[in-house]
Image: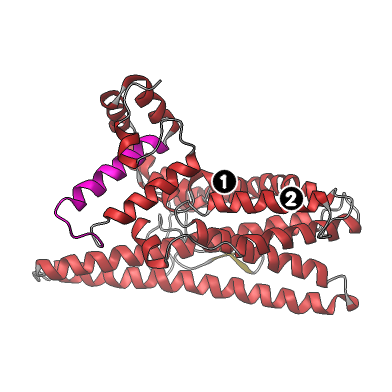
Amino acid sequence: MVKDTYYYDVLEVQPDVQDKDLKKAYRKKAMQFHPDKNKDPGAEEKFKEISIAYQMLSDPDTREVYDKHGRESAQDMNDAGEHDAADFFAATFGGAQFNDLIGQLSMLKDLSEVSTRDAAGSPPTYSRKASLEHHDGEPTRPASPASPLSFKGRLKMSPEEKKRFEIEEARRRKERQERVDILSKKLIERIRPFVEAVNPGIATDPETIAFTEAIKQEAEHLKLESFGIELLHTIGNIYMAKATVALKSKEMLGIPGFFARVKDKGSALKDAWSVLNSAVGVQMIMDDMAKKHDAGEAVPEVDLHAIQADLSGRILLASWRSTRYEVSQVLREVCDKVLTDPDVSEGIHIKRAKAIMLTGALFKAVEPDESDEERRELE
């Protein structure tokens, strides 16, 4: 028995509603009253009310307080919570629901560290270079949105700053490896039912059928997250690409696998340049605004709003491309680790590759319930 049903009534759901149905109800109501689509006088206020209701009920802790003590206590708890840039990006790109598949984005850790340093008044450390970082001759990760966007040359660092930079990079490499190790173990467990099936991959095999249905259900749940479709398709692309390389490497002296690897590396480089170009676009707008400000040039309010809207869109695009690039690079390492595990036989490698291929295909096949435009408005 809950004390207050107001937020449940706003979304037209029952107090025992499950997370998946809660998300569906929110998306349906949000599209119905979105100010860009609904021009009725009370639509905007209703949309805010719907958003607040979902915010309260989608957080397990806030929902528990609300159910026991009502709206006022839940609102007090929500107001007391800390909401920083890391919280925003975590919610924007998949949220915690994707952690078992991609881990925590390093971009979010960077933002948390920057917020902590700023709050403590600590001087910034140069933990990123303006250009793409390299490791063993290959690009590993583009500069994150948390770093200064400057493409005029390398940052000049004092010996003390250089030492801090090296220590920071060593820590990041260690965290990256730990993330890959954890995700590799989780991927092995995820595909274990398929690998251990009596006839894996056969259409009539009960274990294969159960595995396929489980992946489909998980994908249907994950697609409701912000950027869920895009993340699922990104994961699916990497899974299929790496599984293809692994399977083709077993054919004709590995020649088909060689060409598959070339294609995969080409895709990685294309993603890297996409990230860099997006960041450059953001920097150019910011530089132009700074020049106008320094010159004392007044910008009409209508133009300022247009620039702000354009900049917000570009920042979100750059952040998404950075997220996609990071996820792709991490998952490439994860798949390589799982598919070249020296502790299992070649037969297991092949079964794992087939399981990853099937998972990737199912993720790529997921389609949104709404149009692209409607999803963007909600996200």
Q: Quadrant of residue 316?
A: bottom left
- Residue 344, given in percent of the width and then of the height, sits at 88, 51
Residue 26: image tag: none
Q: Give the camera-side residue of 194 and 149.
A: 194
Q: Given the image, on which type of amino acid does mark 2 rest?
A: Phe
* Residue range corresponding to the magenta coloring: 37-58
Residue 99: image tag: 1
- Residue 178, given in percent of the width and then of the height, sits at 65, 45
- Residue 307, given in percent of the width and then of the height, sits at 22, 69
Relative side of 239 to 192, left or right? left
> Of label 1 and label 2, which has the lower sequence position?
1
Mark 1 vs mark 2, CA separation in Å: 20 Å
The prevailing secondary structure element of the residues shown in magenta is helix
Viewer can see residue 122? no
Viewer can see residue 63? yes
* Rendered view: 52 above or below 231: above
Q: How many marks?
A: 2
Q: Give the camera-side residue of 198 and 238.
A: 198
* Rendered view: 314 above or below 252: above
Which residue carries the number 2 mark? Answer: 211
Q: Is residue 137 magenta?
A: no
Q: Residue at x 37, y 59 (%)?
A: 148
Q: Residue at x 50, y 56 (%)?
A: 228
Relative side of 2 to 273, left or right? left
Q: Given the image, on which type of amino acid does mark 1 rest?
A: Asn
Relative side of 367 to 138, left or right? left
Q: Residues within 10 Å of mark 2 (few under 14, many from 20)?
A: many
- In which quadrant of the rendered image does the N terminus lie? top left
Per the image, label 1 sits on a secondary structure element best described as helix
Q: Give the camera-side residue of 63 and 264.
A: 63
